[in-house]
Image (cartoon, rainbow, N blue to C red):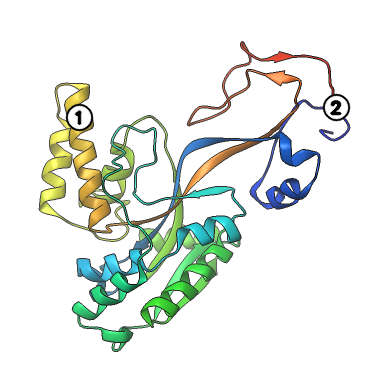
Amino acid sequence: MYRNDELDIAPVAANELQGVRQDQMLKNEIQYWPAAQVLFMGLNERKIAAFKDVRVRQSFAYAIDRETICNHVFFGAWAQALQLVPAGIPGHNVQSELTYDPERARRLIADAGFPGGRGFPAIELAVAGNTDSTAAEAIAAQLERNLSVKVYARPIEHGAFVAGLQGHHWDAFLVGWTADYLSAEQMLYRYLHHAEPMNFVDYYSPIFERVLDSAMHAKTVDAEETLLRKANQIATTEAALIPIAYGKFIFLVKPTVSGFAANLFEPMGFETVHKGRLSRE
């Protein structure tokens, strides 16, 4: 319908993006906006004792080449994530990042007692359905190549995957999160506070929780944001969860249309959208 000029704006799914980008006409009409969404990997400390060591978690984080995954697995439909809280959400901290550094990853896992991956248990990386299974396979391959540990990607039916999360069944897992409102509290408190049922990795840090609890009781918006940023820095540095990619809104927009945009949650209203006459070179 978009090709036939029956639509002026059309969303582009991730599995369609590669074909759209290769189309000589459509590739110049793609527009992107960041979304309040992050794909992350959890390392279950309750299931795998080695994950309690921050050096092991950090080694896994530094061993993942997010840029390659975003460009060659997701074909640009996601952007690499180097910290837990997506940009644009109060609490995002650009000073604390988990960049790709395989040499550092190997040093950390060796310091933790697993030089060259020796003695490290085989890990099952669970993922819901087939949606992100290719990304899970790429992550598993990178971890094996850079750390010499055995990681097996395992697609699981969605209901069984969720039940496994709730039961702390998976060694490691790949899952996405989309913000409900504009605060890092959702990501940090809901997934990492020891009292929350969605802390599927069994992470606990007294310093992190003191900062986070203080943020929850802050008396001003500025004080809350400062404390959430500090909590995000702690959680990111300690690889409490390992960020992989940030989501994007992707739309085809006709050259005649102006004023269309999306915020972090959804496409915005059409009050400022204008349409002229169609003219393609």
Label 2 CA crowd tier, 10 Å (few <14, some 14–19, many 20+): few
Residue that lies at the very extreme toward the top in this rendered image? 271
Label 1 and label 2: CA atoms lie apart by 47 Å
Q: Residue at x 13, y 41 (%)?
A: 211
Q: Which amino acid type is marked by label 1?
A: Glu
Q: Quadrant of residue 145?
A: bottom left
In the rendered image of this protein, does residue 16 appear above or below residue 68?
A: above
Q: Quadrant of residue 150?
A: bottom left
Q: Is residue 131 visible?
A: no
**Tag 1 residue:** 224
Q: Tell whether 155 sits left or right of 104.
A: right
Q: Is residue 92 visible?
A: yes
- Disc 1 or 2, which lies upstream in sequence? 2
Q: Nearer the viewer, residue 218 or 67?
A: 67
Q: Tell whether 247 sits left or right of 121.
A: right
SS at mark 1?
helix
Image quarter of the C terminus: top right
| Disc number placed over residue 6 in the picture, else none | 2
Q: Quadrant of residue 120?
A: bottom left
Q: Residue at x 25, y 83 (%)?
A: 114
Image quarter of the N terminus: top right
Q: Is there a contact, CB below 8 Å, between mark 1 and mark 2?
A: no
